[in-house]
Image (cartoon, coloured by chain):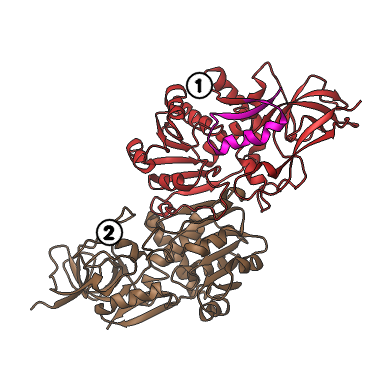
Chain colours: A red, B brown
Amino acid sequence: MTAANRQIRLAARPQGAVKPTDWEHATAPAAEPGEGEFAGRTRFLSLDPAMRGWLDDRPSYLPPVGIGEVMRAGSVIEVTASNHPKYEVGDHVVGTFGVQEHVVSDGRGTIKVDPAAAPLSTYLGALGMPGMTAYFGLLEVGALKDGETVVVSGAAGAVGSIVGQIAKVKGCRVVGIAGGAEKCALLTEELGFDAAIDYRSEDVRKALREHCPDGIDVYFDNVGGPILDAALTRLAMHARVVICGAISQYNAESKVEGPSNYLSLLVRRARMEGFVVFDHAARYKEAAAEMAGWIAEGRLKVKEHIVRGTVDDFPGTLQMLFRGENVGKLVLELV
Amino acid sequence: MTAANRQIRLAARPQGAVKPTDWEHATAPAAEPGEGEFAGRTRFLSLDPAMRGWLDDRPSYLPPVGIGEVMRAGSVIEVTASNHPKYEVGDHVVGTFGVQEHVVSDGRGTIKVDPAAAPLSTYLGALGMPGMTAYFGLLEVGALKDGETVVVSGAAGAVGSIVGQIAKVKGCRVVGIAGGAEKCALLTEELGFDAAIDYRSEDVRKALREHCPDGIDVYFDNVGGPILDAALTRLAMHARVVICGAISQYNAESKVEGPSNYLSLLVRRARMEGFVVFDHAARYKEAAAEMAGWIAEGRLKVKEHIVRGTVDDFPGTLQMLFRGENVGKLVLELV
């Protein structure tokens, strides 16, 4: 009596934007857990800009997803059967289980989470990778000091919305860059940002001049392209530019657009530094505890964009990220 | 009885490469030193890639040279008259005295140098700004560790030739990138570099793959453009990219070419940092003493390219830098 396991597999390496034909919608028999393993049912799937990079066959911080393999994705699953000493039926577990309905795992790289402490989806957002990325990128890589001026792009996204709020906790002046009036209103009216710049309707360079009269101390970049270039023109002395991602460039079919104004790093004695959140894994627990405290105090507001559907909705939902259609963390809840 | 003072002044802001008509060749009466001042005769003029940046009217680490002003330049002068308590006739003094035959100074920002300790021209090179730039850029900004792999571009130039040799003193593997077989031979046969890459005849990316099998720990960039981009593809984990200059871009009439491969900073958890040598002025003396020791021990070979002529030869000599015609520090000796 084996259940069917619906899966999304990579069918072809995308050229530029991902096309529907780059995915294979497949059904496999759901596997039974072996000795020391558990089985589970996927409840929430994480959708992340970084996924685009995982589809390209080039050297990166993780190997590319292979053709024919189940698409890599973080998710929250509910344990349905267990031969694992640490997990019981009914437990909720976060891990990189892939885009599929049913999973089997030996527990490596997984974390048990408490649905009473936070909504399950939040373990994929503020208390998951995006939250950790914001926390360590801003505080460690960006070496944020209290009272500095922080600018973040992709500010209404999963990472950006948290970056700005952590900076506010630290007493900083925070300017967010996002696309559209609605997202900008969210930043200033709900999330406590000092100012928001709508890159779709404003001259970003001019707006940064206005909102950052003393320059930018930390620029947290999620987008790359012309917005990164604009931010480079406004760096304060000894500024830090944190390279977290470059969503504007992930679908580029030709060369990535390099930051033409990079020589301002010299003029402003500034640095630009990249990072990968996994390097900070030893401190996730400590960071998550501090973030959970800020959430409880109402100082960190969790923004999630939950799409309800099936694994077959994964490809279409992923597109929302690259069209800027999500506000906060984008999650697919399997119903 | 006033001597004539031949001067080179900025006549117009250059568009792209500097043209002869961007300079005015003028003659003014040589000034007499006032109270607390000294007068001197220029012996050696420094020619530096950074000079191109000083001609543009845009925010930078120094104000631009004004139209009609004597061109800014470092030089070694010989004191010919003095009302200054610290300088006597016959003393040799380094300062930013400008492109002119005769100077008057109140001594601010000047240093007395000893012609018995080193040739006068060396105070504009290895023991002057280029030497300090190499020293602090590599050791402080680049945070060089013994035994690392260092790549330097513009490796046969004033700064690059010293960067590579300091790295060898520190027990590093050193690869230089330069233009032409002659410069490359100098690097490996005379200056002790482990390998040299001729960017005019070789595929730099491929050559870096071959010469840096474990990646680049410190990349010291003097050139920008495609060579910077190639180096970014070979970074080791936690690499440091030191942005010292971008001579390939200084004459660009359109946008500077940004480094398309900057996202390797993320993949490799690397940083790119700019600096201006003046910030390290408090430690010049200490650095110069250490460099002088290395010179005395034969571990640091001083390469100078001395053109003999008059101040009227300044514009033509400056072009040599942008054509890559100099080997080592380019100096104009007034005869």
- Circles 1, 2 touching at the beta carbon (< 8 Å): no
Left or right side of A172 for A243? right
Amino acid on which disc 1 is placed: Arg
Label 1 – label 2 distance at C-alpha: 46 Å
Q: Nearer the viewer, residue A123 or B238?
A: A123
Q: Is residue A318 covered in magenta?
A: yes
x, y percent for residue B108: 25, 60
Q: Nearer the viewer, residue B294 or A186?
A: A186
Image position, residue B139 (x, y; %): 51, 58
Return the residue found at the far top: A116
Residue A80, compared with residue B20, is above or below; it is above
- Residue A158: image quadrant is top right
Query: Is residue B151 shown left or right of residue A44?
Result: left
Residue A84 visible to the viewer: yes
Is residue B64 highlighted in magenta? no
Name the residue: 53% across, 51% down: B271
The three-letter amino acid code for the residue at tag 2 is Pro
Question: Mark 1 sits on what residue?
Answer: A299
Q: Which residue is mark 2?
A: B64
Please state the extent of the stretch shown in magenta in the rendering.
A307-335
Residue B193 showing in the rendered view: no
